[in-house]
Amino acid sequence: MAKYDFDYFVIGAGSGGVRSARIAANHGARVAIAEERYLGGTCVNVGCVPKKLLSYAAHFAHDFEDAAGFGWTVGDRRHDWARLIANKNTEIERLNGIYRHLLEGAGCTLIEDRATLVDAHTVAVGDDRYTAETILIATGGWPTLPDQPGAREYGITSNEAFFLEEMPEHVVIAGGGYIAVEFAGIFNGLGANVCQLYRGPMFLRGFDDDVRETLAEEMSKAGIDLRFNTIIDRIEKTSDCLLAHLTDGSVIETGAVMFAIGRRPNTAGLGLEDVGVALNRKAAIIVDDRYRTSVPNICALGDVTDRINLTPVAIAEGHALADTLFGGTPRGVEYENVPSAVFSSPPVGSVGLTEAAARAKYGAVDIYRSSFRPMKHTLGGRDERTMMKLIVDRATDRVVGCHMVGLDAPEITQGVAVAMNCGATKAQFDRTIGIHPTAAEELVTMRTKAPEPVGEDA
Ligand code: NDP
């Protein structure tokens, strides 16, 4: 008789939980996975996937406009938001089905309900109790709303933005992270008047300064009203609109106020504190390099640990943990050079260190920067530039950072991340033959170092 009902009980069927459950089951473990909301978690339902579909929708607006320069006459254009959302929902349902199929096909027991911890080896689901040798918490995160008056009553988050019945003609977006800039581009592309607010002097904190400045410039040129150093003080509802009162004293009449001011780990009400799982001050679960919490047989990964909150990271962690526990191959995840993209308009691709971080770490670095008008925009006429930047550690010649704003940036950056993980040097970039004509070839043809900032050693 087995000591426990299951070898592995996973709470949360998002990106990390599903991968971990599936791989564990493939290794022969008896696995249960509980999910209270939707299969596939944030990424599939209210994150990466629907966001990218909406981003595609928004980009057609550019394509229609730019087509004229290539000889096309494009007739009347109208966008049907309801149809977009309905089609998006159908696609998401298809993906939910694929996730179900993957889990069931691997032999996992799927429990579609809320699970909470009773003790270190026991999970409660309604009136049922299940025991497991190892429990994984992969419950992800949830968007936050601020406490300002009116924010909770009238504000929305990305969760609701994906299901709006109508596209607002005017949107105020509060926040300066991934989600805020992505939605600013989506709503702007679909024809709304967009005002984006950020509390500091320049949004996308943590990204390379050239990326931040280039994107701010391009978004402004595209008609987005960017306002920095201000936030919403309160929201008031009138008979026909919302009034967003800002801390700088201005008032904006708008149809919707969307907050994208960060996400909170989903740790409340799970019984974590009762069984002794330690949380940090942001309520994220603290784990070691093998995803063990302060209760050794309870593990956690993905957004609920609030480290690198990206789907592919959660997937990699879930896979590594399952291999460690049930596959006889203990391993962690390599967190250096995690690439990421912001699906803004134009998009951003980024991997490795920012210039500031590279200077702090290595001292002497060489910067190669290029800014150009993409070929598509020569005939298309769009006033949008591409910026590319390589950061090289002068002592070793290794490329330690690559940052890009412009068409295809996310697609290009993935390949650069592989090269950087192989320790590629600038000389090896230079030896690589470009693909012509592409924007990507710029990365292997940049030869001129940017001048040193004033006050730096040459
Ligand atoms: P982020 O943490 O990226 O950004 C939050 C933004 O809100 C920051 O600009 C922050 O400012 C600002 N902010 C925080 N608190 C307040 C406040 N009280 N009032 C006003 N502004 C505030 O969160 P997001 O919600 O954009 O995204 C969450 C995470 O999801 C990301 O960190 C990312 O890991 C992931 N994600 C990844 C995507 C991708 O890979 N393409 C897409 C979407 C999300 P400050 O910088 O000053 O702290």
Image (spheres, rainbow, N blue to C red):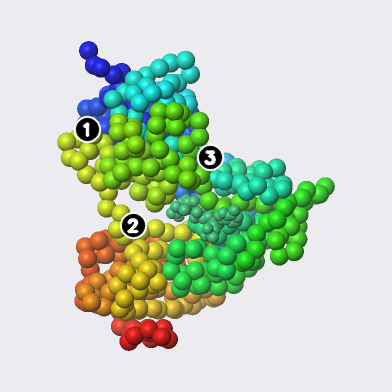
Q: Is residue 113 above or below residue 452?
A: above
Q: Is tag 1's residue or tag 2's residue first in the polypeptide sequence?
A: 1
Q: Is residue 137 visible?
A: yes
Label 1 amino acid? Answer: Phe
In the picture, measured across the screen, residue 252 lies left or right of residue 322, that is: right
Q: Is tag 2's residue or tag 3's residue first in the polypeptide sequence?
A: 3
Quarter in which the C terminus is drawn: bottom left
Image marks 3 and 1: residues in contact by CB distance under 8 Å: no
Q: Quadrant of residue 15?
A: top left
- What element does badge 1 sit on? helix
Of 267 and 37, nearer the camera is: 267
Instruction: Report which residue position mark 1 lands on.
Output: 326
Residue 323 in picture, x, y percent from top left: 23, 38
Q: Quadrant of residue 129?
A: top left
Residue 30 in picture, x, y percent from top left: 27, 24
Instruction: Report which residue position mark 3 lands on.
Output: 89
Of 33 and 231, nearer the camera is: 231
Dot 2 surroundings within 10 Å: few (below 14), some, or many (20 or more)? some
Question: Whole-Å distance between the Cαs marked 2 and 3?
Answer: 30 Å
In the picture, measured across the screen, residue 314 lies left or right of residue 76, that is: left
> Which one is closest to the eye, mark 2 or mark 3?
2
